[in-house]
């Protein structure tokens, strides 16, 4: 049996972080007229970024973009830098996924302190 929790849209904050990447394999050459195209291979360009943000019915945080990997300490810093300036939000239900650092004691204590469930 599934239980449906009815929550007003104004009482929810959606948060997520995601790793995005770009692999660029094409080569560009600047060649003067009459010069031969180089045959030297260059390794592909790879760019990996982590992006974090939160939205709610009548607001949003700024996006956090970094090359750093997330862990509980880094996540706490992101919350303090981007979510804290938007406070107080009142009692909100904070919806995020099951990544382990979301459920650490230090993160749950922060949510309690800012009245997020």
Image (cartoon, rainbow, N blue to C red):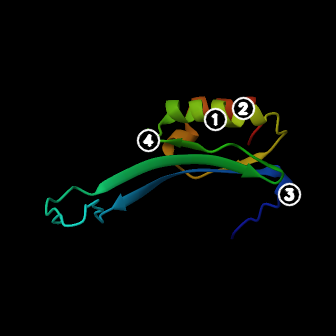
| Residue 18, placed above or below residue 78 | below
SS class of the residue under badge 1? Answer: helix
| Element assignment for label 2 | helix
The answer to whether mark 1 and mark 2 are in CB contact below 8 A is yes
First in sequence, mark 1 or 2: give its number.
1
The CA distance from mark 2 to mark 3 is 22 Å
Q: Which residue is mark 4?
A: 67
Disc 2 target residue? 84
Query: Disc 1 versus disc 2: distance between alpha carbons?
Result: 6 Å
Residue 54, image x, y percentages:
68, 48
Residue at image position (75%, 40%) is 116
Q: Name which residue lies at 76% across and 48% down.
A: 93
For mark 1, what is the residue?
79
Single out the residue that lies furthest toward the bottom: 1
Q: Residue at x 40, y 50 (%)?
A: 48
Q: How far is the residue under mark 4 from the one under mark 3?
A: 35 Å
Q: CA distance from mark 1 to mark 4?
A: 17 Å
- Among numbered discs 4 and 3, the one appearing first in the sequence: 3
Residue 55 locus on image (x, y percent): 72, 51
Mark 4 surroundings within 10 Å by alpha-carbon count, few (fewer than 14), some (14 through 19), many (20 or more): few
């Amino acid at each position: 049996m599934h239980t449906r929790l009815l929550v007003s849209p104004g009482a929810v904050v959606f948060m997520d972080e995601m790793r995005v990447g770009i692999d660029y394999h094409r080569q560009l050459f600047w060649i003067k007229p009459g010069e031969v195209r180089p045959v030297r291979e260059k390794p592909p360009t790879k760019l990996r970024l982590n992006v974090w943000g939160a939205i709610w019915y009548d607001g949003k945080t700024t996006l956090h973009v970094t090359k750093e990997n997330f862990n509980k300490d880094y996540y706490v810093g992101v919350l303090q830098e981007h979510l804290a300036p938007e406070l107080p939000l009142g009692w909100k239900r904070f919806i995020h996924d099951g990544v382990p650092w979301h459920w650490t004691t230090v993160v749950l204590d922060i949510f309690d302190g800012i009245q997020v469930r």
